[in-house]
Image (tube, rainbow, N blue to C red):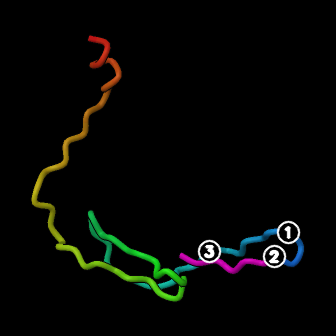
Amino acid sequence: MAAGVDTSRGFHAGVPGQLYAAPTAIGAASLLTSRGQGLLLMPVEQHVAEPISVMVNWLSALKQ
């Protein structure tokens, strides 16, 4: 996403819009170049090798 910025009278960000289309996946990584002139995308595999576990009510489990 990208938005125009106006700093002539303080800071005002414009409406964000899509900067580029790229496939999304769990574990996708990106890096902005040091001078801010480019964006590097690291390709990732489209499948997840390990299942994801989600623990709910973990605070009450700590009290036990």
Seen in the image, is 56 located left or right of residue 49? right
Residue found at the very far left of the displayed protein: 49
| Residue 8, image x, y percentages | 87, 78
Tell me the element at label 2: loop
Q: Are marks 2 and 1 in contact (CB under 8 Å)?
A: yes
Q: Residue 24's spot in the image, x, y percent?
A: 32, 72
- Going by the numbered disc 1, the residue's amino acid type is Gly
Q: Residues within 10 Å of mark 1 (few under 14, many from 20)?
A: few
Instruction: Locate residue 5: give its quadrant.
Output: bottom right
Q: Amino acid at mark 2?
A: Thr
Q: Residues within 10 Å of mark 2 (few under 14, many from 20)?
A: few
Distance, label 2 to label 1, CA atoms, is 5 Å
Residue labelled with disc 3:
16
Magenta span: chief secondary structure:
loop
Q: How many marks?
A: 3
Which residue lies most toward the right here? Answer: 9
Q: Position of residue 15 (x, y in %)?
A: 67, 74
Measure the C-alpha gap from mark 3 to mark 2.
Answer: 16 Å
- Which residue was labeled with disc 1? 10
Give the crowd class for mark 3: few <14, some 14-19, many >=20 residues within 10 Å. few
Magenta stretch bounds: 1-6
Residue 44, placed above or below residue 37: above
What residue is pinned by disc 2? Answer: 7
Q: Are marks 1 and 3 in contact (CB under 8 Å)?
A: no
Q: Amino acid at mark 3?
A: Pro
Q: Is residue 33 left or right of residue 4?
A: left
